[in-house]
Image (spheres, grey):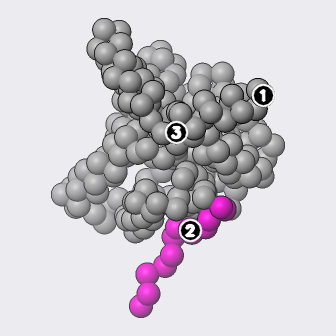
């Protein structure tokens, strides 16, 4: 029997769209969906024709997070191994040269919020809501959510959120969890449009900018200054920079 396809893959020019597609479970991250999603994402990351990746969910919701219905039938070893694999996968997002964007409609819970936190850019429909959910089933955050959340939301807002407070789209925008808010039903369209705007910029500069943002979050000012200088030296010597400067001068004439 063929395995059900739980992740839909589409292309819009150079933007790869990955859609979590199991609306009956609100796109719950079952073991099968996680494996399909990681494989599809890794293919997109390796595909030279793909310049940006957009992740979204089908059926009016982004993702309800872990598949609770499957948890009782899994051994501790199975669950820990699945968590290890998804941890390693999420750690690739910040280092991936390509921008990763998330489009949230409806509910984002657990791992769905973790992906929103880890993305480079995210949009939420105005009726979206972000729920932690882990503590209600006697678990702690996974997929790196507890690492990202204090850096994005701040420690006190993170504590409140983890202990049951929901974050709506307006609050998500105010705290930096998402980059933009849009009308319901237009999150994917908005994310793809933004992805095309981003990848229209010279690749060397936008790739370096992503590296610098991540480095700034993980280093002190002195270490970052050295990293910035090395990055700028590399860019100044790049063909992309020379071509962009020449194009600017040509337009001024």
Q: Which residues are magenta?
A: 1-13
Q: Residues within 10 Å of mark 2 (few under 14, many from 20)?
A: some
The answer to whether marks 3 and 1 mark residues whose Cβ atoms lie closer than 8 Å is no
Would you identify the image quadrant in which residue 60 lies?
bottom right
The circle on residue 21 is: none
Residue at 39% x, 19% y: name it.
Answer: 228
Q: Residue furthest bottom?
A: 1
What is the C-alpha distance between the residues marked 1 and 2?
45 Å
The label nearer to you, 2 versus 3, is 3
Q: Mark 2 or mark 3: which comes first in sequence?
A: 2
Q: Of the residues under marks 1 and 2, which one precedes in the sequence? A: 2
Q: Residues within 10 Å of mark 3 (few under 14, many from 20)?
A: some
Give the mark nearer the N terminus: 3 vs 1.
3
Confirm whether residue 133 shows in the render. Answer: no
Please state if 42 lies on the left or on the right of 56 as rendered.
left
Q: CA distance from mark 2 to mark 3?
A: 31 Å
Residue in front for this viewpoint, 25 or 197: 197
Callout in the foreground (1, 2): 1
Tell me what residue is drawn at x 67 percent, y 35 percent. Answer: 247
Residue 167: percent from left, percent from top: 61, 30
**Image coordinates for residue 20, horizontal then vertical, percent:** 55, 61
Quadrant of residue 165 in the image? top right
Tell me, yes or no, whether the highlighted magenta stretch contains residue 6: yes
In the rendered structure, find residue 253 and report the number of the disc placed on it.
1
**Distance from the alpha carbon under mark 3 to that under mark 1:** 20 Å
Residue indicated by mark 2: 9
Q: Is residue 95 magenta?
A: no
User: Residue at left 40%, top 60%?
Assistant: 46
The N terminus: image quadrant: bottom left
| Residue at the spot of label 3 | 240
* Residue 195 x/y as whole percent: 64, 46
């Amino acid at each position: 029997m063929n395995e059900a396809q739980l992740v839909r893959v589409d292309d819009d020019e150079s933007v790869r769209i990955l859609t979590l597609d199991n609306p009956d479970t609100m796109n719950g991250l079952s073991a099968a969906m996680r494996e399909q999603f990681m494989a599809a994402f890794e293919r997109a990351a390796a595909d030279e024709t793909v310049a940006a990746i957009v992740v979204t969910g089908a059926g009016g919701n982004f993702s309800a997070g872990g598949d609770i219905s499957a948890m009782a039938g899994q051994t501790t070893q199975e669950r820990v191994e699945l968590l290890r694999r998804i941890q390693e996968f999420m750690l690739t997002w910040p280092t991936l040269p390509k921008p990763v964007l998330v489009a949230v409609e409806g509910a984002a819970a657990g791992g769905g919020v973790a992906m929103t936190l880890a993305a480079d850019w995210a949009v939420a429909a105005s009726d979206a809501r972000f729920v932690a959910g882990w503590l209600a089933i006697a678990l702690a955050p996974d997929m790196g959510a507890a690492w990202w959340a204090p850096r994005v939301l701040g420690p006190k807002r993170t504590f409140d959120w983890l202990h049951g407070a929901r974050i709506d789209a307006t609050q998500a925008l105010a705290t930096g969890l998402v980059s933009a808010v849009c009308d319901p039903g237009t999150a994917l369209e908005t994310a793809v449009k933004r992805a095309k705007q981003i990848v229209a910029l010279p690749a060397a500069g936008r790739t370096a900018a992503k590296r610098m943002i991540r480095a700034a979050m993980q280093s002190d000012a002195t270490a970052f200054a050295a990293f910035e200088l090395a990055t700028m030296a590399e860019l100044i010597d790049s063909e992309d920079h020379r071509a962009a400067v020449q194009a600017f001068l040509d337009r001024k004439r």
